[in-house]
Image (tube, rainbow, N blue to C red):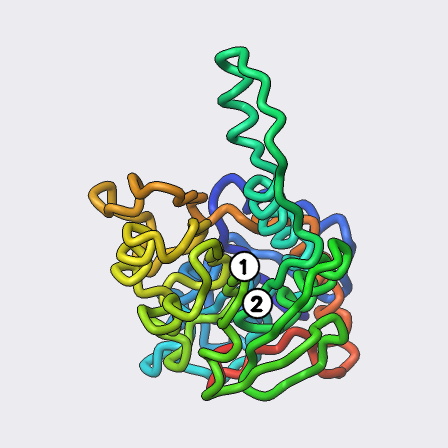
Amino acid sequence: MHTLLIQSNPKTMDMYRELVTAAGLPSLQIVDSPSPKVDIFLGEPTRLVPLLPQLPSLIWAHSIWAGIEPLLDDSLRRDYILTNARGIFGGLMSEFVFGYMLLHERKILQRLEAQKIGRWDSSITGTLRGKTIGLLGVGSIGGDLAATARHFNMKVRGYTVSSESCPHVDRYFHPPHLADFASGLDYLVSVLPDTGQTARLVDTSLLACLPPGAIFINVGRGNVLDEAALIQALRNEKLAGAVLDVFEQEPLPADNPLWHEKNVFITSHSAAPSFPNYITALFLENYRLLIDGQPLKYRVNFERGY
């Protein structure tokens, strides 16, 4: 018999419990509070961190987020299998990223402002066709973004440490060729995780490689961006705009100048919500593998951080 503890925000915790219960999983008991007998955890990484000392029997934790940074602290135990929500956020991220790219190209806000004052605006719009998108990180989410870019007949560049597994990327770049990767991009999109290697990767030197009409979009992790460098690039018109969903400090402080910076969209970590029905499907798949003695999918490597 396995014992499951579910921990998420109050709005979704009952939903997770109902979905798991409805699946009728064999040999599984769901409990409401931590105890020594709990051996499986489903929930938010931040809620698991303080509970780890109370769960000596833990063998598997499934994060309802893609990000698992809170559990990577060297002071925390790692004697359990950690899996995360992988493979379900790509479509949601594509909706978000290309929604804002189309907003820019098709001058949607400009048209709206013209409508408000009754002015006929027939100016020519841009198009995604033929534009170049650069993906900082080409994991499962980056792969979905690349596929969507293909749909719009865009040119796709990918920047990764080593892998070249996505067939939708036209050209791959690896360290230390970051400047070559960024040169001439119309859109720079970061989907990188939070690791020591990604900190402040988008800095003054990288932004200087982009043409003045480029847009930076960050849907990965806030640590990748040097905010001061971005603000300077925007104010000096070295960059056309930015869409920022994630930040190093969240919530973003009210006095942060990015709130009021021209041509910046702040979306408050809402690009790809963790919908319980999608997350639960991953958990159910892995639970069945667990009881069959098979390797679990979506496993996180504690050393790599993803």
Query: Disc 2 on helix, strand or loop?
Result: strand
**Quick check: 51 left or right of 91?**
left
Q: Earlier in the sequence, mark 1 or mark 2?
A: 2
Q: In the rendered image, which residue does mark 2 sit on?
A: 134
Question: Quadrant location of residue 51?
Answer: bottom left
187 shown above or below 172: above
Residue nearest the viewer, comparing 121 with 32: 121
Q: Residue at x 65, y 56 (%)?
A: 279
Q: Residue at x 55, y 46 (%)?
A: 13
Question: Crowding near pointer 2: few (<14 within 10 Å), some, many (20+)?
Answer: many
Q: Could you say where residue 38 lies in the image, as x and y percent from the top left? A: 53, 68
Q: In the rendered image, which residue does mark 1 sit on?
A: 187
Q: Residue at x 53, y 58 (%)?
A: 43
Q: Looking at the picture, which amino acid does disc 2 mark? A: Gly
Asked if the residue under mark 2 is in contact with the one under mark 1, i.e. CB atoms within 8 Å, the reply is yes
Q: Could you say where residue 245 lies in the image, as x and y percent from the top left? A: 45, 51
Query: Disc 1 on helix, strand or loop?
Result: strand
Q: Residue at x 62, y 38 (%)?
A: 125
